[in-house]
Image (cartoon, helix red, strand yellow):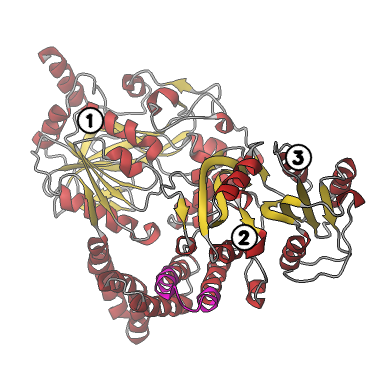
Amino acid sequence: MIRKIGFEPFESTLLEGITMKVSVAMITYNHEQFIAQSLESVLMQQVNFDYEIVIGEDCSTDNTRDILIRYQKEYPEKIRLLLPDKNLGMHDNVIQVLNACRGDYIALLEGDDYWTSPYKLQKQVDFLDTHTDYTICFHNAFYLYQDGSKTEYHKVLPQKVLNLEDLLSLGNLMPTASIMFRQDCIHEFPEWIYDIDFLDRIIQIFAAQHGKIGYIDENMSMYRVHSQGNWSRKSQVQGLLEIVNWFYSLDKYLDFKYQDRIKLLLAELYRKLAIIHFEEIRDRKNAIKYTNNYLFSSILSKTSLKTVALFAIQIYTPTLFKLIKKLNRLRITLWCKFDVAFIEPLIVKLSIKHIYGLKKINYELDELIVTCLVRNGELYMKSFIEHHCSLGIKHIVFLDNGSTDETIKIAKRYDNVTILHSSCPYRKYEKAMKKYLVKRFSKNRWNLFVDIDELFDYPFSDTLSVSSLLNYLNKNSYTSVVVQMLDMFSSKSLARLKSTKNDDIKRIYNYYDISNVIRDEYPSEDVPPLEEIKMHFGGIRKTFFGSDNGLTKAALVFVNPKIELFVGHHHTKNAKIADFTCILLHYPFTSYFYHKVMEAVESDRYASSASHEYKMYWNKIIQNPELSLKRDTACRLETLNDLVEKGFLVTSQNYIQLAQANKKTE
């Protein structure tokens, strides 16, 4: 027995004296929306052995208990209910359920999750019966989100046999609803479990002390991600601190046998905490405190000195800046400029790792390369590369900022691609990373900087080559081109969009709406030569989300020391603007829109203006998940010439003559 809990279970006498092969251990609290589906997924199991369902209902304030009592009366030979008179809390509820289990094996299932395969129990029992040196096994699962979409828990898990050390990681290796373990390998819980909310990970560790861990590569359960989930309610800092406490307690419990591994994990946790306090909470005191902890843990875990020093510079530099501010305001100004001009570029440069492709690109004045800062762009990658190559772009350079999807894998399929990586926080180092890319690869050459969800094009590109376009710019001494963004969308509602990384996004998202685009005078010091060239604002994002975002960029630039890049993020200074405008077909409203907005709101990784915009999107999506962007004013994009005729794009008479001459030549 693990620990006694003082009350009698609400159960049928039909179960007395019966030996069980498997006990399904369930805990539940306020799960009235989910508990029936969870129970049905257990009752559908097709097995050749006896099993019981032991449920700890912890005094829910909704109808969960009533639903369970109805099910128990219908299935008295299967269901045992534990109904305390007062709320026990998660820890004691788990303990009393495990105490009540009589099976040789115990399978875990929480009241808001469910199983998807009727053979799940049979497959896991067969595995443990035939592998007597294994004490626990698990299988793959899906995450189920509130919008109905789902993703795999493990995209790839090559190991089929694991051990305790594999469980020592920041993430949870085993989905809770996938776990089955031998009952006799869990004897008692130490007192420190009451400081930890993820009891399933504790069970994994205890079971793995006595044998191997088996993995069945099959999706047989669903892990529900929703706002009422125990882990979902925690703040990011609370969650990380709980994992820190968990590793300290676990290190001691395991007699420091795995301390090298645990010190490495603690270093990473302290690094994350320092970044959150520094970048998001703006609490420099705690940022320095966690940085000190990071340095100590990193030294003990033998982390490379370069990695440690790079991170320390990032956190400590603002503190030095603050000290200087107290001494002299003039020094503040000088230091601020020094930080932007030297410290930030130095941090970015030290962080760069070469992943794939050419390290240096030689190209001529009438040739063009694309640079792009990207994170998790797998949906766009194929379309992005193939579209720009079709225009005649010579080479594409990506700076990956921590992709966790197949962005890098897809990019590696193409010969004319270079991939770099930097782990610098996007919110602080966005501009420094962009400048690094442009200045490294395009010194005294033309550069096109484009986001991964944007496709560049220009008027008459069907007859006018990139080479002819650049020669025109060079001949007239232009050094910057105004580029207008055009938000593209599908005719379907946002909730019904389904696209994959192999799709042609131009074909799927082929509608636009310029009815609410606001035009204003160009505010930059670099004045366009034509009055018709304006700054664009609003558009479809203003119509549906109330956003007054800018739609104008200087994306195509001749890079020389005189021109200041990324002024106000998207413009130039000291450049000569061309007498025509180009376009960036912008694809934010894809099937990934919901997840990108949710991630942006939760992580707050973008600058304040962009972060505010994502929160506006989120509020609108919550109010209307079935939102459709296609109104009567929407048009299907057939040719860029249509946008010239509508005045969205501007072309001078000289540019038109160039295009006509080029067409005659062809």
Highlighted magenta segment, given as a residue range: 249-268
- Residue at 58% of width from left, 33% of height from top? 495
Secondary element under disc 1, as helix, strand or loop, is helix
**Spatial CA span between label 3 and label 2:** 22 Å
Kind of element beneath mark 2: helix
Q: Which mark is residue 638?
A: none
Numbered mark located on residue 200 in the image: 2
Q: Does the magenta portion include 340?
A: no
500 to the left or right of 120: left
Disc 3 on helix, strand or loop?
helix
Task: Point out the tag, 2 or 1, that comes first from the N-terminus.
Answer: 2
Q: Position of residue 427 (x, y in %)?
A: 40, 58
Residue 181 position, x and y percent, is 62, 56
- Three-letter amino acid code at disc 2? Asp
Residue drawn where x is 40% and y is 36% of the image: 379
Identify residue for label 3: 43
Comparing 202 with 37, the one in front is 202
| Residue 388 falls in image quadrant | top left
Tell me the residue at 54%/73% (across/down): 250
